[in-house]
Structures are given as structure tokens and as C-alpha cells.
């Protein structure tokens, strides 16, 4: 059983997935923040691979990527960060999230092999729809990495089977037709679509985009098996990038978010 | 038994691939929309009524066919090949961009879309889009890099006069690639009512093929005009390349005429051996951006590099996927011309022919100047004069140290 499957199997409540960009604001502090996330309540961690042109991301995550790149982030550094995290944590799944080009340049095969070796559990590649993902998907499978697919409000019923086919780990439901950091979705408006998706898959469904507060988390946890918070956390990192206790500030926020799931 | 002759004109395949390039590398939110654009385009392109409307507007609104002009003074000056200009700078709005804007505008209307977005570099595509949107009464928003807004002020004002909203993009290098990122983000957020009118043979399938098909009117007219004037096909075709729409439109009808030499001119900026240029084929490698696989300027980590060209219209770190494929196939020869060479060519063409070219085709003209003298007098060379230079006089004046 993969680390992701184990995590979902062991939890008696919806999971909290937190997103940070690798190398933001710099390698050392990003690692400190990463290490602090599980204790603060993150069940799964999405680690963003910085890219110059993140077309599905709003200003907050765009800026995080550029901050990281400015301090020297690259794919090797991201993988090293996972390896350093894994040295002290063998249970919390890490999912790398990003865009296809940095992976293509690293080499699809080598990327998957090195990711698996570093302790990565899954991949979410925003600009690789099922129509274009065959090669990376095969390499991921070969190396035991889950290939997590995105579904959106525009994914009509007849397309759901195409998307969920060969997906593994969990499914990521983008709850708004928009970019990251947008206004949140109305939970009741997305429920019918989630129900529809469940007819085609037994995989857990995580809901993301526009989810910022413990109240948002609580509301969407009623519908999904996991809730993803990204921009809100990255925004905290941006606002406190020079603070000595950056990871403490982030931890406090994540504890608050996770409080939306218990109780 | 003879096998079927090879053709380069059937690409892309049904998934939008030109060899290994092209495709649909977009977020899932856009995927259903991309598929619906493709479906609508497939229906439209087989509908004679669609083309009747396109042809009517091409003739009576754009002013097509654009003339094929024998550039006698240039020919005399360069003492070699017989040089013609395909005069797409005489089109309504002053460049070839209007060709695909009319086409995509008609498609957007056919699809019932009530809002159009577009990116623009030099502002030519933005002006052409705003023009078509004014004509079709569809509200439009044009995304433009803040840097480009500064260097193309007249076009910004034109767009506003035409009723468009111009939205400045300050992220990244604040030029064409960032404008395209912003347009894609807007599209993701407004899928239900918005049509993205892409300004070149780039982006996800079906855009590269669709824009090419609209721009192919240039090459098709040229075939007929050349037959009339010289009774034969030309020997060489030369066009500048940013994303590559005017070049693709000129080249495509000639792809299978292997005796016709095709030459694409990339923007060499300060030189392709520096890090300040926009020559994706000369200095880039295959990658994925803006919905397509193609050649891009990038570092070893796959981070996209900022392009540089004196010409805002060529200032893009990528190139259309069909060009990448034709480059690998060696069907088209791709060369580059520096800012300084383009600037000289801009002035030379103005004085020789009384035609002030845009900085974009000034790149093509600079290359024509390099090769024409070495070619025999019966060699017929056609250069696409894809835009006029009125918009560039401020940039050029500044480079020449002239205060306006």
C-alpha cells in the first residue's frame, strides 16, 4: 500500500493537505517550514516545484515561485529537500505539484526515479491532461509514484472516465473555474459534481482552490475526503519571510486549519 | 507501384501533434473548452457559408488580396535576385494579424461567445482583435506587458479608441509571454463565456493549425499572383518569425513544392551568442509552455528565459510548433538577424522603396539584403512585408538618438 493510501486508510476524518512552494523564501527556511507541517496538522504535503510561468496559479503562488527561483531553487534542490524531510519523517506523504517543463528538462524517467528515491509519493502536473501524460505516467508507475489527476467544474460527466482512468493516490477536485487563490466555491454547488465523480472511482477526492480559513476547511470537509490549502499558507510565508520564527507562525496557521477537521 | 507522395501539409494529427510538437498541454479546466473550440473549428472549416463570410470580409474589410509588388529599387540596389514584396502591411490595421482575427472572431461568434480576450506584444494583434470586436460588437480585453505598453503607446491608444480594455501585465518580463500567461489565467477563470483569440500559430491545438489556416490566405494569393506575373513559382520565400504566424501563412501552401526555398528569420537581438535575443530555434530547445510542446528559450532547469528583441512583435521566447517540426525536418531554413541589422534595414527600405516597414519585417528585409546579391538575376525572391512601421517610429527615433 502506498504511503498516500495508508494515510487515507488510517485517518478517521478528512485529511488536511497543505501546499508550500519548495525553496520559498529560501532553501533553508523552506525546509524548516516543511518539517514543521506534520506536527501542526498537515496529513499530506503538496510541495510546489517552482516554475517561471505557472499559468494556473494566481499572484500569491506565482510570487512564491519567483522568490524561490531568485534564491537558487531548481529541481535538484527540491528533491534534496524531500530527502532531508524524509530523514526525519517516514509517514507523511509528499506530493510534488507543478508544471511539465522542468520535469521534461530533467528527464521524465530520471525525474521519477530520483523522486521515488528521495521519498516522493505522488505527482500532480497541472499542464499534463490525460491526452498528453502517457510518458510521464508510465515512468511514475514504474517507480511507484501515484499519478494524481485534476478534475474541475468544467469536467463534464462524459469526460470523467477519461480523467480518472489510470489515476492513483487521490483525485484533486479544483472547486472553482479559476486560478489558485481565487474566491472559494460554494460547497453546496459542487456537491452534485463530486457525487457524480464518485460513481466512477473509489479514490479519495481532495478539494482545493480558494480554501483559506478553518471555516472553509470545515465546510468543504463535509463533501471531500481531503481539503487543500495553498495560497493562504504561502501568503503567510510571503508576509513573514524575514521573521525569525517563520515556521512557528506557519504552524500556528496550519493548526488552526486542522482544527476545522476535528470537532 | 508508386507510393503516395509525401506531404507536409497534413499535419497536425488529430491530437494536434506536428511530429513530437504541438499538442494540448493545458490545465483540466481548459481541456473541455479546447475540445469544444476544436469541434467548432472542424465544423466551421468545412462549412462553405463560414468561408463565404470570411472571404467577403477579407476582400471588402481587410482589403485583400494584398498586392504583390516588384521591388525594383531594392532589386537594383542589391544587384542580384529579383525581389518582390507581398504587401500585407497594406491590410486594414496595418499588418497580417487581421487575417486570423477576422477568422477567429467569426468562430467566436459562431460559438455564441460573448467576450473575447487576447494577448499582444507589439500591439498589432491587439489592435486587430479590438477592431474585429468593434465590428462584431463583442466586448474585449487585451493583455499586454507593461514594458510593451510603454514602447507601443500609439497602439495602446488605438485599442482604447476601438473600445477595448487594455490590461497591463507586470509579472515576469512584462512582455508577450507574460501577457499570454495572464490571458490563459483569465480564460481559466471565465471559461463559460470567453473566447481566447490567440495572436499567432501557438498555444494548444487547434490554435496553431487554425491560425495557420487563416493566414494561409497570404501564400495562396501569392501562388496565383506569381503565376500571373511570372508564370511560375517563386524560388525563395522570406518571412520574419516571432511566434511565426505570417511565416506559416506564407509558407504553408508551398510546403510540398520542394523547389521553393523557405527561409524564416528569427530575432537575434544583440546576437544569438548572447543571452539577449528571441531566436528560439537557434538558441532554445524543446519544452512545454503555453499549451504546446515546441522550442523555447530556457535554462537547464526548464525555467523559461526572457526574450529580447528591438521588435516587440518578435519578443517571445517560443515559436509555433509547426515551425519546430519544419526545423527538425529541415524543410525551412531558419536564420537570425540582430537588432542593429534590423534597424539598418528599416531605414534602407524606407529610403529605397518609400515603404516604412515594421521592425518585424525589417528583420526579413535585413536577411534579404544579405543573400540577394549572391543570387542570380532570374532568382525570384518574395519577402512578406507583414506590417507597416508607423507604430515603430518612436522606438526607432530613440535608437537613432532623435528627439520627437
Image (spheres, helix red, strand yellow):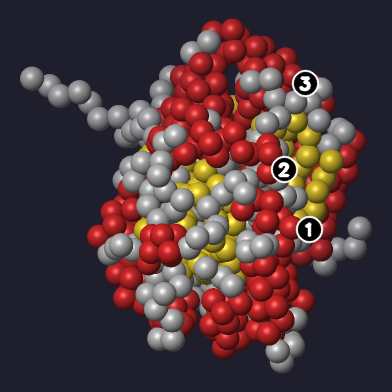
Q: Residues within 10 Å of mark 3 (few under 14, many from 20)?
A: some
For image coordinates 64% across by 67% down, the residue present is: A258
* Neighbour tally class for label 2: few under 14, some 14-19, many 20 plus, Cα within 10 Å: few
Given residues A176 and B174, the one toward you in this image is A176
Question: Image quarter for residue B342?
Answer: bottom right
Q: Is residue B338 visible?
A: no
Characterize the local packing of mark 1: few (<14), some (14-19) or many (20 or more) Cα atoms within 10 angstroms: many
Outermost residue toward the front in this view = A263
Whole-number angstrom distance, CA of label 2 to CA of label 1? 35 Å
Circle 3 marks a residue in which chain? Answer: B
On screen, B16 above or below B364? above
**Nearer to us: label 3 or label 2:** 2
For mark 1, give the secondary structure. helix
* Tally of numbered tags: 3
Q: Secondary structure at mark 3?
A: helix
Is B85 left, or right, of B172 in this rendering? left
* Residue at mark 3: B136
Residue at 68% in and 39% down: A188
Residue marked by disc 1: B146
Residue located farthest toward the bottom when viewing the structure as drawn:
A244
Amino acid at each position: 500500500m502506498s504511503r498516500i493510501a495508508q494515510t487515507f486508510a488510517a485517518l478517521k476524518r478528512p485529511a488536511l493537505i497543505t501546499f508550500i512552494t519548495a525553496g520559498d523564501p529560501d532553501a533553508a527556511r523552506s525546509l524548516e517550514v516543511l518539517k514543521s507541517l506534520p506536527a501542526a496538522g498537515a496529513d499530506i504535503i503538496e510541495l510546489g516545484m517552482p516554475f517561471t510561468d505557472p499559468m494556473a496559479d494566481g499572484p500569491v503562488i506565482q510570487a512564491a515561485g519567483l522568490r524561490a527561483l531568485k534564491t537558487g531553487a531548481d529541481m535538484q534542490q527540491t528533491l534534496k529537500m524531500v530527502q532531508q524531510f524524509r530523514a526525519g519523517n517516514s509517514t507523511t506523504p509528499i506530493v510534488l505539484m507543478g508544471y511539465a517543463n522542468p520535469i521534461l528538462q530533467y528527464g521524465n524517467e530520471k525525474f521519477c526515479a530520483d523522486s521515488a528515491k528521495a521519498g516522493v509519493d505522488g505527482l500532480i502536473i497541472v499542464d499534463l491532461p490525460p491526452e498528453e501524460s502517457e510518458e510521464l505516467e508510465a515512468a511514475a508507475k514504474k517507480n511507484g509514484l501515484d499519478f494524481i489527476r485534476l478534475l474541475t467544474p468544467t469536467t463534464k460527466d462524459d469526460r470523467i472516465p477519461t480523467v480518472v482512468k489510470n489515476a492513483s493516490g487521490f483525485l484533486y477536485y479544483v472547486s472553482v473555474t479559476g486560478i489558485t487563490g481565487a474566491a472559494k466555491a460554494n460547497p453546496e454547488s459542487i456537491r452534485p459534481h463530486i457525487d457524480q465523480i464518485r460513481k466512477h472511482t473509489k479514490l479519495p477526492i481532495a478539494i482545493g482552490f480558494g480554501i483559506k480559513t478553518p471555516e472553509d476547511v470545515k465546510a468543504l470537509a463535509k463533501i471531500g475526503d481531503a481539503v487543500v490549502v495553498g495560497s493562504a499558507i504561502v501568503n503567510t510565508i510571503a508576509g513573514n519571510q524575514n521573521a525569525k520564527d517563520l515556521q512557528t507562525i506557519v504552524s500556528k496557521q496550519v493548526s488552526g486549519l486542522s482544527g476545522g477537521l476535528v470537532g | 507501384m508508386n507510393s503516395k507522395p509525401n506531404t507536409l501539409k497534413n499535419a497536425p494529427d488529430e491530437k494536434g501533434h506536428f511530429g513530437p510538437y504541438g499538442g494540448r498541454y493545458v490545465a483540466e479546466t481548459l481541456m473541455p473548452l479546447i475540445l469544444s473550440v476544436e469541434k467548432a473549428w472542424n465544423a466551421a472549416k468545412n462549412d462553405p457559408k463560414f468561408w463565404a463570410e470570411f472571404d467577403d470580409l477579407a476582400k471588402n474589410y481587410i482589403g485583400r488580396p494584398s498586392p504583390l509588388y516588384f521591388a525594383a529599387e531594392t532589386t537594383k540596389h542589391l544587384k542580384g535576385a529579383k525581389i518582390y514584396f507581398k504587401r500585407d502591411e497594406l491590410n486594414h490595421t496595418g499588418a497580417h494579424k487581421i487575417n486570423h482575427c477576422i477568422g477567429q472572431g467569426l468562430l467566436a461568434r459562431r460559438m455564441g461567445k460573448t467576450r473575447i480576450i487576447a494577448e499582444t506584444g507589439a500591439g498589432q494583434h491587439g489592435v486587430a482583435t479590438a477592431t474585429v470586436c468593434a465590428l462584431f460588437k463583442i466586448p474585449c480585453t487585451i493583455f499586454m506587458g507593461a514594458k510593451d505598453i510603454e514602447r507601443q503607446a500609439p497602439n495602446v491608444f488605438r485599442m482604447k479608441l476601438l473600445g477595448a480594455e487594455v490590461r497591463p501585465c507586470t509579472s515576469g518580463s512584462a512582455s508577450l509571454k507574460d501577457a499570454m500567461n495572464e490571458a490563459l489565467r483569465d480564460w481559466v477563470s471565465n471559461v463559460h463565456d470567453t473566447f481566447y483569440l490567440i495572436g499567432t500559430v501557438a498555444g494548444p491545438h487547434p490554435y496553431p493549425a487554425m491560425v495557420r489556416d487563416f493566414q494561409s490566405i497570404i501564400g495562396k494569393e501569392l501562388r496565383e499572383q506569381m503565376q500571373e506575373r511570372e508564370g511560375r513559382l517563386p524560388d525563395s520565400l522570406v518571412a520574419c518569425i516571432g511566434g511565426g504566424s505570417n511565416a506559416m501563412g506564407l509558407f504553408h501552401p508551398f510546403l510540398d513544392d520542394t523547389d521553393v526555398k523557405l527561409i524564416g528569420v528569427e530575432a537575434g537581438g544583440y546576437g544569438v551568442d548572447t543571452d539577449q535575443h528571441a531566436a528560439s530555434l537557434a538558441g532554445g530547445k524543446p519544452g512545454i509552455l503555453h499549451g504546446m510542446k515546441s522550442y523555447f528559450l530556457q535554462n537547464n532547469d526548464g525555467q523559461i528565459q526572457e526574450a529580447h528583441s528591438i521588435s516587440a512583435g518578435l519578443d517571445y521566447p517560443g515559436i509555433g510548433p509547426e515551425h519546430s517540426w519544419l526545423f527538425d525536418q529541415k524543410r525551412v531554413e531558419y536564420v537570425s538577424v540582430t537588432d542593429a541589422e534590423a534597424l539598418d534595414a528599416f531605414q534602407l527600405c524606407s529610403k529605397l522603396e518609400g515603404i516604412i516597414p515594421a521592425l518585424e519585417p525589417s528583420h526579413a528585409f535585413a536577411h534579404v539584403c544579405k543573400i540577394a546579391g549572391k543570387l542570380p538575376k532570374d532568382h525570384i525572391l518574395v519577402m512578406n512585408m507583414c506590417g507597416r512601421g508607423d507604430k515603430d517610429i518612436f522606438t526607432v527615433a530613440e535608437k537613432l538618438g532623435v528627439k520627437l
